Amino acid sequence: MHKTGDVVLGGLFEIHFFSTYPDLSFTSEPQQPTCYGFDVIGFRLTQTMAFAIDEINRNSNLLPNVTLGYSLYDNCNTLGVGFRAALSLASGLEEQVILHQSCEGPTPVLGIVGDSSSTRSIAISTVLGLYRVPMVSYFSTCSCLSDRKKFPSFFRTIPSDAFQVRAIIQILKRFGWTWIGLLISDDAYGLHAARSFQSDLGPTSGGCLAYTETLPWGNNPAERKRIVDVMKKSTARVVIVFAHEGHMIDLMEEVVRQNVTGLQWIASEAWTSATVLQTPRLMPYLGGTLGIAIRQGEIPGLRDFLLQICPDLHHNNSYGNNMVNQFWEHTFQCRFAPPPAGWVEAEGALCTGQEDLESVETEFLDVSNLRPEYNVYKAVYALAYALDNMLQCEPGRGPFSGNSCGNLRLEPWQLVYYLEKVNFTTSFGDQVSFDVNGDVLPIYDIMNWQWLPDGRTKVQTVGEVKKSAFKGEELTLDEDKIFWNFESKQPPRSVCSESCPPGTRMARKKGEPECCFDCIPCSDGMISNKTDSMECTSCPEDFWSSPQRDHCVPKKTEFLSYHEPLGICLTATSLLGTFICAVVLGIFIYYRRTPIVRANNSELSFQLLLSLKLCFLCSLLFIGHPRVWTCQLRHAAFGISFVLCVSCILVKTMVVLAVFKASKPGGEASLKWFGAVQQRGTVLVLTSIQATICTAWLLSSSPAPHKNIQYHNDKIVYECVVGSTVGFAVLLGYIGLLAILSFLLAFLARNLPDSFNEAKLITFSMLIFCAVWVTFVPAYISSPGKYADAVEVFAILASSFGLLVALFGPKCYIILLRPERNTKKAIMGRGTTNS
């Protein structure tokens, strides 16, 4: 189809589906291939380009005083035919080539709109790119065409497959589909898409390909059966088909034969709008399909332009009119004269050329779903705007050598320059511009194949995915409008392995894709990692994993508490001992003038009772949350209190020995060394030594609170570390030294004559005291955490009660229950008798 003009634009379209080549004898010039199978949609694309050029010629604001023409060729859906057509457009020598003819002068066409196939566009643009002839495709989507080094003059108004793949991945992520089957065509369209899926559908998107199969060309039922068997056996419920309409027709025959249902199909733009697949026979299988579709647009006035088409009965020989006539015959199922042999006999109708297009139902006039037509429309306008920008160039300010401008006799590469800068907005509101790779700003509609209750089918737009210069890729989806072809009416699950629950980590299965994994529980003290599902994260030092191992919780704390049974018992025992000491002290004060109280220095007895009370009270410092002051005070108070207690006992023992020694002839002098002052001084000196030891210990290496996490992984044991083991050992050793000395002296005085010899009581009490503290050391060392404190408190209480009962029990018994024995005569009675 041709139309003259000041500037001619070329076009390559698919008017026929098939072509046959004559046999090559190599003895005569080969004949042209025969094309058949009229493509109504392809013919509408040619008319869209003709309409766009007619509209531009009528627009006084765009290319004023310049008339555009066109030269449109049929590629017959064949590489050879399309390639020949492109070379004819570029060279202008359609009929013959004269060798050595000069190639000077303007090119016959300044730019070409086409082709519809990626394979043909690759071949054609490879050659045209050598001469920088601009080519704007409306349907070639292969991402390989974005290579500017190989295709320097190629542009397109349809997004690249690379973006189409990313758009499909956005849908997969939206519905959580990670286990995918992929079917591709055996051409550049499918193979490059598969490569993009394998690179993009990875760790970032969290998806895997369960299988990738290549759909065969032509009649190959065995291979199609094998592919459908793979689909049936796979656990992937989502199948992406990146192939052409013809592939799907053949594939669905085998799918129907094997009755493969329950799949969610995702269609590439090549077959999303294929009405031949939207039949009652196939919709039980293909219903609910989600597809990527070319952006739908509106072209006002196109339908009226299409209605003006009419056949030319006088020029039926020319190919352009022949195409119109073929369309007429296809639409009205008639034939122009002369009809083919047997047509009239078969009662076939003859075309008159007066038939009414509006009287028949034809998709040719359906302009409600313009998608590739809209891309053709934008491609023509892109070339027109580039040419218009070139003509508006001011002489001397141009972008070319010497600041020159182009003109209507421009070189093709000059138009390429302006195409790269073009930026306009269509009447539908879409912005058109090309990036550095010649790709248009991408935008796709998302379609859903809906199977209505009355059996009709409807392809509904349910969203869009686009890329903007500012926001990046955006997916907009109205899920309420989507029809799901499942009983649940909900999107299916398509995963190889379900997501690991909280508290577990992923462990990949050997030899399988990364989407297939086992879930292994996290170890104690670790939780599942939200950023890295392959690893578990350790909780901080003061935290432990929850029972579900999905978050960290503060560790339990352990110390000898006032609120636990053990702490309550020890506290009650300590207070009981203190109370008994107070009672005994009260009894002794009340009966202070009786012989049994006055015997053997009542002042020392009062000091001993006070020190025992301090011993009982100091045990309380070992109970409760360890603090710095309690850690420092507990051992100092314990050491000083017990030294005070044992010092009083030691002095009492020494007094007993001195008294009996003085009772012998010549022993009176020994009593002057054990008067009241000397007794107080001895107690003070002995206690001061312990105080000095404690002070040195606290100043050099003071006890301090410590968080111990070694005993239990899930607990923090709060304890007081002694700081200096030597200091603690010296403190205990000094108490032990005094206790042993007291025990030995009392043991020596146990058989001295007296009705009430206190040395026996001291011997027994010191025996209990030493026994308790000898067993304390190994028990303390082997007890962890709070139990070490409990052992020390128990030792303090046991030894204190031992001293209290052994020393003051018999005296209280006599004072309260046997008062007749609380006399000087009774106390001295045994000694008088012996005399």
Image: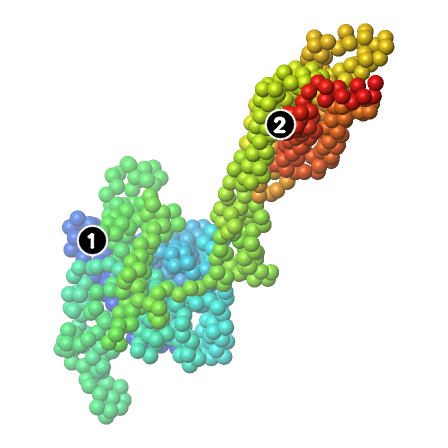
Please give the name of the residue rendered at 25% of the width and 74% of the height, measured from the top-left corner.
Answer: 453
Question: Looking at the image, is 33 positioned above or below residue 725?
Answer: below
Q: Secondary structure at mark 2?
A: helix
- The part of the image, by quadrant, that contains residue 588 is top right
Tell me how many marks there are: 2
The CA span between labels 1 and 2 is: 118 Å
Side (left or right) of 564 relative to 470:
right
Q: In the image shown, does 734 or 231 lie closer to the viewer?
A: 734
- Residue ID at (65%, 15%): 603
Which image quadrant: the C terminus?
top right
Task: Inspect the image, locate mark 2, and give the three-letter code of the amino acid beneath it.
Answer: Leu
- The secondary structure type at the circle numbered 1 is loop
User: What percent of the width, then of the height, locates residue 571?
Assistant: 57, 33
In the rendered image of this protein, does residue 592 appear above or below residue 491?
above
Q: Which residue is mark 2?
A: 816
Question: Where on the picture, by quarter, is residue 577?
Answer: top right
Dot in front, 1 or 2: 2
Label 2: few (<14), some (14–19) or many (≥20) C-alpha neighbours in 10 Å: few
**Residue 44 x/y as whole percent:** 25, 67
Residue in front for this viewpoint, 489 or 347: 489
Give the residue number, with chain letter if any, for mark 1.
427
Residue 598: give its label.
none
The image quadrant where one finds the N terminus is bottom left
Report x, y in % for residue 204: 47, 51
Residue 767, relative to residue 384: is it above or below? above
Relative placement, left or right, of 597 versus 745 is left
- Dot 1 alpha-carbon crowd within 10 angstroms: few under 14, some 14 to 19, many 20 or more: few
**Residue at 69% in and 15% down:** 601
Residue 222: percent from left, percent from top = 50, 79
Sequence-wise, the earlier of marks 1 and 2 is 1
Is residue 283 visible in this depiction of the protein? yes
